[in-house]
Amino acid sequence: MIVTQLNLADFRNYAAADVAVHPGANLFVGKNGQGKTNLVEALGYLSTLGSHRVSSDQALIRAGQDSAVIRAKLHHDGRDLLAEVQINRSGANRAQVNRGQIRPRDLPRYFTSVLFAPEDLGILRGDPSARRRFLDQLLILRTPRLAGVLADYDRVLKQRNTLLKSSRGSGLRENQLTTLEIWDDKLIALGSEIISERLRLVAELRLPIREAYAAVVGDDHGPAIIPVLSIAGNDAEDESSVDSGAVPTENTSRERIAEVFREALGAKRRLELDRGLTLIGPHRDDVRFDLNALPVKGYASHGESWSFALALKLASAEILRRDSPLGDPVLILDDVFAELDQRRRARLAVAISRYEQVLITAAVLDDIPEELTAHVVHIRAGAVLDPEAVGDAFA
């Protein structure tokens, strides 16, 4: 899968932009604040329906406008495809493929990208929600139908919390108890599937993370990823939680996960009623990242954390290229090389050379290894300066 043309309308600081994109490495160069990251952010949004920089879509729409449009011409296996999304300031977003309307959440079925940016240090150093979001976005890229499972789980969780809050302090009446048991069943069914899929993903990431870390760093520091599950007593949102010892693994059946889930809910029933909050489930889970048998968070240096986060995204891309019917994901590296020494820049250039298409942003051209500079686009104040960039591909 490669992008051959990117078109933006009223996205971030671009009133309009048309950019021709080539197979292999593509480099967007510009001083900070000129808009180079906005270009790759748009492609990241097209495959994940989210920004790596902000949580709200509103910031993506140019000031004073009602909507923004991202449109990309894609090529895979001899076929061209036009994918687009309209981000609206009010009302639901809209999406099209080959001019036919689709649900926005179905866009990842048609385009896959993996983006690494400085903000991804938050996956390692931030709160558990950042790590859950990383896993879930990767799950959706691999299996788009899981977007619906995650959305249904969030809906059930909100309904269950509403019931718990209404009963807080006074206990459950008989009719409320019956209703809570119904929500329990739904929470367990959806939550067990999410936990099972996350465990399988964590297991599959382990080897690619080690290989990617060694490829960039040149040493094996024993990078590891370890699940932290609330159904096993490890509540990522509660430091006082106690490990029950019964930790499901990727080989644990979904039926067994559901049994452990139900038992954990029962054990927390009184506390949930007191707090008016659901305390068990994938929304309270986490993963721990280790280097040399120590947690990255709190122990690793900035350089080690940067290399681990980069390895995490390269491992994600490796899993997707292995499993996706769309071929290689488009690999996006936003302002990455400036943080690496010359040796690691060269090693990273080798590591990414296997991908069909790589998009790179940089403030300084000299930061980029020469073999990655065949196609350079210069950006200044929301304008694409390269004469190749403007085309009639969307006519």
Image (spheres, rainbow, N blue to C red):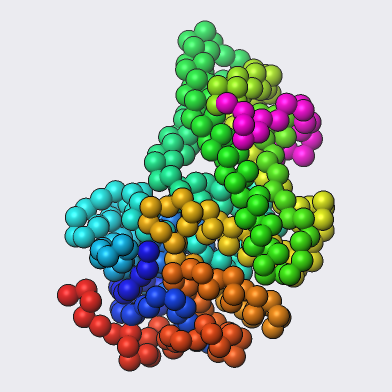
Q: Position of residue 83 (x, y in %)?
A: 29, 62
Residue 249 forms part of the magenta stretch: yes
Q: Position of residue 280 (x, y in %)?
A: 63, 29
Nearer the observer, 25 or 391 = 25
- What secondary structure is the magenta-colored segment mainly? loop
The image shows residue 295, relative to residue 73, as above or below, that is above
Q: On the rendered structure, is 295 left or right of 56?
A: right
Nearer the observer, 59 or 265 = 265
Q: Quadrant of the C terminus?
A: bottom left
Q: Position of residue 98 (x, y in %)?
A: 21, 60
| Residue 58 quadrant | bottom left
Q: On the rendered structure, is 144 left or right of 102?
A: right
The image shows residue 140, relative to residue 208, as above or below, that is above
For the record, the magenta segment spans 235-253
Residue shown at the point (51%, 65%) measured from the top left: 115
Q: Is residue 38 among the parts visible in the rendering?
A: no
Residue shown at the point (73%, 70%) measured from the top left: 218
Q: Quadrant of the N terminus?
A: bottom left
Q: How many marks?
A: 0
Residue shown at the point (55%, 22%) measured from the top left: 255
The image shows residue 272, relative to residue 47, as above or below, that is above
Q: Is residue 388 among the parts visible in the rendering?
A: yes
